[in-house]
Structures are given as C-alpha cells and as structure tokens.
Image (cartoon, rainbow, N blue to C red):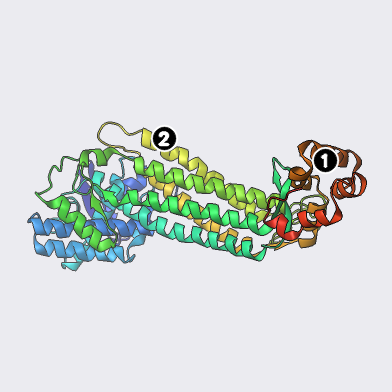
Amino acid sequence: MEPTRKEHDFLGELEIPNHLYYGIQTFRAVENFNITGIPISKEPLFIKALGYVKKAAALANKDCGAIDAKIAEAICYGSDQVIGGKFDQEFVSDLIQGGAGTSVNMNANEVIANIGLEYLGHKKGEYNFLHPNNHVNCSQSTNDAYPSAFRIALYLKMETFIKTLAGLEVAFAKKGEEFKEVLKMGRTQLQDAVPMTLGQEFKAYATTIGEDIQRLKNAQELLLEINMGATAIGTKVNAPEGYPEICVKYLADEVGIPLTLSPDLIEATVDTGAYVQIMGTLKRSAVKISKICNDLRLLSSGPRTGLNEINLPARQPGSSIMPGKVNPVIPEVVNQTCFYVIGQDLTVTMAAEAGQLQLNVMEPVIAFAMFTSLDYLSNAIQTLIDKCINGITANVDHCYNMVMNSIGIVTQLNPIIGYEESASIAGEALKTGKSVHQIAVLERKLITQEKWDEIYSLENLIHPKFITK
C-alpha cells in the first residue's frame, strides 16, 4: 500500500497519500465539490497568480516582523515553484465551489507549505515547522487572497484574449483591402438598398472589432485595484501595520503590472462591479462577432439559390444524405460559442447581485464563467481567422451583375428625377422584370446614356458624390 501521512483539521483526521503536496483541506474540497470536473489545474494563470500573492505576502510579513526570514525564504521558494508551473497538477479543487474560494486558497497554502517543508529539510505534513495557515496564509484571508489572485489571472488572460481579437481585426482589414473594388449590393432589412463594395463591408467588420478592443482595454484597467491586506472583511484584522501597502508593492513588482491598493478595503472586499462591467464588454464582443458570422453565412448562401457573393473555405462534407453539400461550419461553431459567452454574462450578473453584507461568496462561479468565456471565445476567434476569414474569396462578376440588375440602384436617380419618379420606375421594374436602365433611359428617356454612365460608374458607386440634373 502507498505510504500515507496523517493530517488533521478541526473536523477530524484524514490519511493523505504521501506523494501529494496538497493536504487535508484540499482533500475535503475534492470530496465535496465534484461540480464541473474542471480543476484549478486547467487555469495555470490562476495558479501562477496564487503563487505571486503568497510570495508577496511572505515578503511583506517578513518586512513587518510577522514571520522570520527563514520561513519567508521557504514560502518564497515554494511560491516560485508554483509560479513556474511545476506543481500545477497539485491544484485539484473544482473551479466552482462553496466557501467563497477557501478551498482554492487552502490548496495553494498546503502545496506551498509542503514544498517549503522539503526545502527546509522536513517531511510533508510536518506543519509545526511551516504551517499552511499560520505561515503561508499569514496576514491574509481567502477574502483578500482569492480575489486578488483572480484579478491578476483575469488581467493576464484578458491580455492574451485582446491579442487574439486584434488578430481578427487584422484579418478583416486585409480582406477589406483585397475586396476594395468588388462592387456589390448593400442591403437593409434583407432588401436591396444601395451599392457598396465588399471591401467596405469587411473593413466595417475590422472597425467594429477595433472598437471592442479599446473597450476591453478600458475595462481591464478596473482589475488593477486589489484588496490585499483587507483580510476578512476589510478591517485588516490580524494584519500588521503597513502590511497592505508593502504587500501590494511587492505584488506589483512580482507580476509586472501596476497594481494598486483599494482606498476602501471594506468596499473592495464585497464589490464585484468590475466583473460585471468586463463580462458585459465581453458579451458585447460576442454579440458583434456572432452578428458578423450571421452575415458570412448569408453572404455565402447558395451556391445557386442564395446570395453567393462570397465563398467560405470548404472544411467538411455538409450532409450525410445530400451529396456535394458544404455547410458554413466555422461561422456556425463561432455562433454557438458566442451564445455560451452571452449566457455567462447573466451568470456573472446574478452572482454579483447575490453578494450579501461584507462579502460576495459567489466569486468562484464568476471566475468559472469569465475564465471559460475568455478561453472558448479566444479559441473560436482563432478558428474563425485560420479556417474561415483568411480563405474567403469573392464572386466578383456575380456581385456586379446583382448590382446592375437590382431595383435598389434607382436610389442614385433621386437627386436628378425626384423621389416620385424614382419610385414609379422601381414599381414598374418590380412588376415587369425590366431593368432600371431600360425604363429610365430607353423608355422614359428621363436621363441620357452619358448621364447614366456618370451616375453608375464604378468610382461613383463606390464613393458616391452628389450629381445634379
């Protein structure tokens, strides 16, 4: 049988397999919270952030005289090992859990304590030399350590997501340039409107994504204010004088981002408004991306009975019964991912609202919703870039012919022949199937062929200018 060590908490004793670096409180969390099947080990940035928090706390506690230098050195060593990712597999508690994240905090405390014990020449579990609560968690509570680590991890994860989103902006911009002279029909309410270019359409996609990048960067800044040193509810109970300021300075230096201490630690300990705003901004991006995917599916519909203005790369056979059918599977999967993110916005909203008095215990589900949303949407965006956007081609002649055969081009005649006459031409064209050109130029002789050529030149259709009678 595998050797074990006996550990205890105030609920009793448990035998812990000796090879494990986590201890009794993490063991209880594994038994209690089998919810998502996704352990913290799947979020390495969160583990890294927990390591940063514990290291900064140890350095601040040493400076304040709360722990001695040797203990601080061992905690810093253990924290560095965790930051380096060498013990990710030891972080086993489920991302969704009760207790406001206490199990996550204790998972970190126990792993770092046992790494530190071996560093000091002791065995795992010999907590009289280095204790998870008394030393690793010194001057801390789950209520400041967990949200501070969460904010750091979320900030870093958002940086990666924003870079991925910027890649989508670039991909659309490149297609905008590629298609800048491809004339097509613009549509409103799925009806013919006025001419434009396919390049203008794709450039607009790039612009709208660029706007969201800026909004996400603005929202990301909200994560820089943390409550380290607040301890239980923001009163700094059990923390030495000056500890919060020293700890946050160490933490900012370790992580390399401009973290600041909240001016009101009681407010900061209960408030989750930053998550609501960030998730709302992420939902905004998901909504926009999903709308663009709807457009791509419409623009590529057909090939014979749809719009068929663009071709999406063929990625797989589209049907088990209809030979030759190719479906827009990449936009479809991105749509579905966006629906998930939009739903998680409500999860974050309800969890933030569920805070009571001096603490919001629902932060674990907020973390789950935001981490998974960023991961899934990032994967979906990269898939959209690589397997769809980069390979889109235009059906140039088909787009042009649809414009010239459209009734919508009669709008360009309004300044010359007036709205009533234009509407009359549109009505006759719709009823008879005749072209606008045939009715306006050849039959009614409202304008000359020369004027027609001026109005409907490629340059004027792409960049309309006011043309007088």
Q: CA distance from mark 2 to mark 1?
A: 52 Å
Residue 20 position by quadrant: bottom left
Residue bearing the label numbered 1: 426
Tell which of 132 and 333 is nearer to you.
333
| Percent coordinates x, y for residue 160 in the rendering | 43, 60
Look at the numbered disc 2 and give the secondary structure of its residue: helix
| Percent coordinates x, y for residue 96 in the rendering | 39, 44
Q: Which amino acid type is shown beneath numbered disc 1?
A: Ala
Look at the numbered disc 1 and give the secondary structure of its residue: helix
- Considering every residue shown, the one lying at the far left of the view is 65
Q: Is residue 207 visible?
A: yes
| Percent coordinates x, y for residue 443 in the rendering | 92, 46
The residue shown at (24%, 38%) is 267
Q: Which amino acid type is shown beneath numbered disc 2?
A: Met
The crowd level at tag 1 (other Cα within 10 Å; few <14, some 14-19, many 20+) is many
Q: Is residue 148 left or right of residue 57?
A: right
Q: Is residue 190 left or right of residue 98?
A: right
Residue bearing the label numbered 2: 350
Tell which of 86 and 252 is nearer to you.
252
Of discs 2 and 1, which sits in the foreground? 1
| Percent coordinates x, y for residue 261 in the rendering | 22, 49
The residue shown at (54%, 63%) is 170
